[in-house]
Image: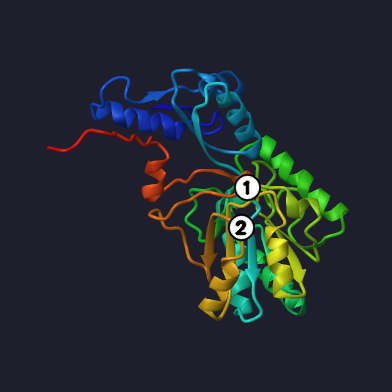
Amino acid sequence: MVLKPSEVAPLNGIVFAEILHEAGVPAGVFNLVNGDGPSVGAPLSSHKDLDMVSFTGSTRAGVAIAKAAADTVKRVAQELGGKSPNIVLEDADLQTAIAGGVMHMMTNSGQSCNAPSRMLVPASKHEEAKQIAKATVEAMKLGAPDSDEPQILGPVVSEVQFNKIQGLIEKGISEGATLVAGGPGRPEGFNKGYYVRPTVFADANNEMTIAQEEIFGPVLTIIPYESEEEAIQIANDTPYGLAGYVQSGDVEHARKVARQIRAGNIHINGAGPDIDAPFGGYKMSGNGREWGEYGFEEFLEVKAMLGAQAA
């Protein structure tokens, strides 16, 4: 195995390498190479002696890796971006569904590939949903990641990411979405660090940039729908397909809707992750699966031996 960590956050990979070394793993079984994508990732992806590439990151980088790997016809497994829908059905408990969806969106300061970044709510409950979302955001506490305060929203990973998020927030405003909470700039009381104000847009439609592009920051887009069929259509109207979320007072109703969402992982009524379940996406969210049995199978080839009768 050859691991190339993100150049933005390489320390966990270095610690892991040190652990394996101290444990006595034979030399060459695990290898660590640091560097950026163009100088290290590209040569690894195209190298003739590598049988398989597993990548987690942006769809843009995933496309480049797949192209680099094509000449040597190696296996490629990818877990890429997402713009996951969170459908709040008519029969859902609105307070629980909206507040829970907002909190889930803001986890990791919005830096989760499967974040429920598009919240679809019945048009008749849109105004109430806006108020619940606003109150939920205003109750959040921001601060350093090592703070003991609950509900801490920390900074985003880099200046590049901070600037990208700021640009997309401005884009949401300019395209006419209603700014319910947050907005551009750092939060009040923070004059340094890459802190982003937890932001909620509403009165949005699925053609807006903030509904189509992965923001990878604490920005939620609320989109009203008129019918369940329209909600499903909006949910699937995206180049991504990593995850989906359905909130309903009736589990069978939620399952019926969940089956129609083209995404690799569907969470019903706030269900959390399960590392025994396969994790991965449809469409431009990648190919292959991580976690559980399926995660191991991505690294295996199938061999058939014919004509060798057992004794």
Q: Position of residue 274 (x, y in %)?
A: 42, 58
Q: Residue at x 51, y 61 (%)?
A: 150
Separation of disc 2 and disc 1 at Cα?
Answer: 9 Å
Residue most toward the left? Answer: 311
Q: Are marks 2 and 1 in contact (CB under 8 Å)?
A: yes
Query: In the rendered view, does 283 fall on the left or right side of 280?
Result: right
Q: How many residues crowd around disc 1 within 10 Å: few (fewer than 14), some, or many (20 or more)?
A: some
Marker disc for residue 283: 1
Query: In the rendered view, does 199 fall on the left or right side of 45?
Result: right
Residue 210 versus residue 296 in the image, above or below:
below
Query: In the rendered view, does 32 fall on the left or right side of 209?
Result: left
Question: Is 99 or 119 nearer to us in this picture?
Answer: 119
Question: Is 123 or 229 nearer to us in this picture?
Answer: 229
- Where disc 1 sits, the SS reads helix
Residue 257 versus residue 158 in the image, above or below:
below
Q: Position of residue 145 (x, y in %)?
A: 52, 48
Residue most toward the front? Answer: 307
Q: Position of residue 197 (x, y in %)?
A: 69, 53
Indicate the quadrant where residue 131 lies: bottom right
Marker disc for residue 262: 2
Q: Position of residue 208 (x, y in %)?
A: 81, 54
Return the disc, 2 or 1, that comes first in the chain's sequence: 2
Q: Label 1 sits on what residue type?
A: Lys
Question: Is 191 or 294 nearer to us in this picture?
Answer: 294
Q: Residue at x 54, y 61 (%)?
A: 266
Q: Residue at x 40, y 47 (%)?
A: 294
Q: How many marks?
A: 2
Q: Label 2 sits on what residue type?
A: Arg
